[in-house]
């Protein structure tokens, strides 16, 4: 998936906007907020997978050199 495809297939702007609003209005803000289902799955994968495996998968998903 190239850059323009990633944008086209990404989460709707409203999903990201909701995360921004939550981050800016939360009385006890968290260090990180996820926006959309892919970000949530990536967050879980990061917790479970070794760093090298996670990094390789993210690079593959973004079509970067491994």
Image (cartoon, rainbow, N blue to C red):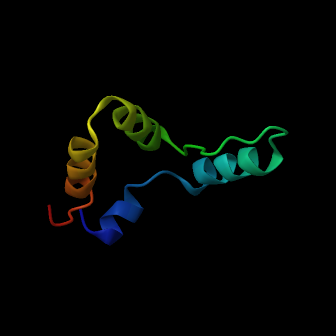
Q: Quadrant of residue 4?
A: bottom left
| Depth order, front residue of 5/44 | 44
Decide: is 43 above or below 14.
above
Location of the C terminus by quadrant is bottom left
**How far across and down, in percent of the image, does residue 2 sit?**
26, 68
**How far across and down, in percent of the image, does residue 47 sit?**
39, 32
| Depth order, front residue of 28/22 | 28
Determine the residue positioned at 60% across, 52% down.
16
52 on left or right of 25:
left
Residue that sits furthest to the front in the current view: 51
39 on left or right of 60:
right
Location of the N terminus by quadrant is bottom left
Determine the residue positioned at 32% across, 70% down.
3
**How far across and down, in percent of the image, does residue 56 sit?**
20, 51
Determine the residue positioned at 58% across, 57% down.
13
**How far across and down, in percent of the image, does residue 53 sit?**
21, 42
Determine the residue positioned at 53% across, 52% down.
12
């Amino acid at each position: 998936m190239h850059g323009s495809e990633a944008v086209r297939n990404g989460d709707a702007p409203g999903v990201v906007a909701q995360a921004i609003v939550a981050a800016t209005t939360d009385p006890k803000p968290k260090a990180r907020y996820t926006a959309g289902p892919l970000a949530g799955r990536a967050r879980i994968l990061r917790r479970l997978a070794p760093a090298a495996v996670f990094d390789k998968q993210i690079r593959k998903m973004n079509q970067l050199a491994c």
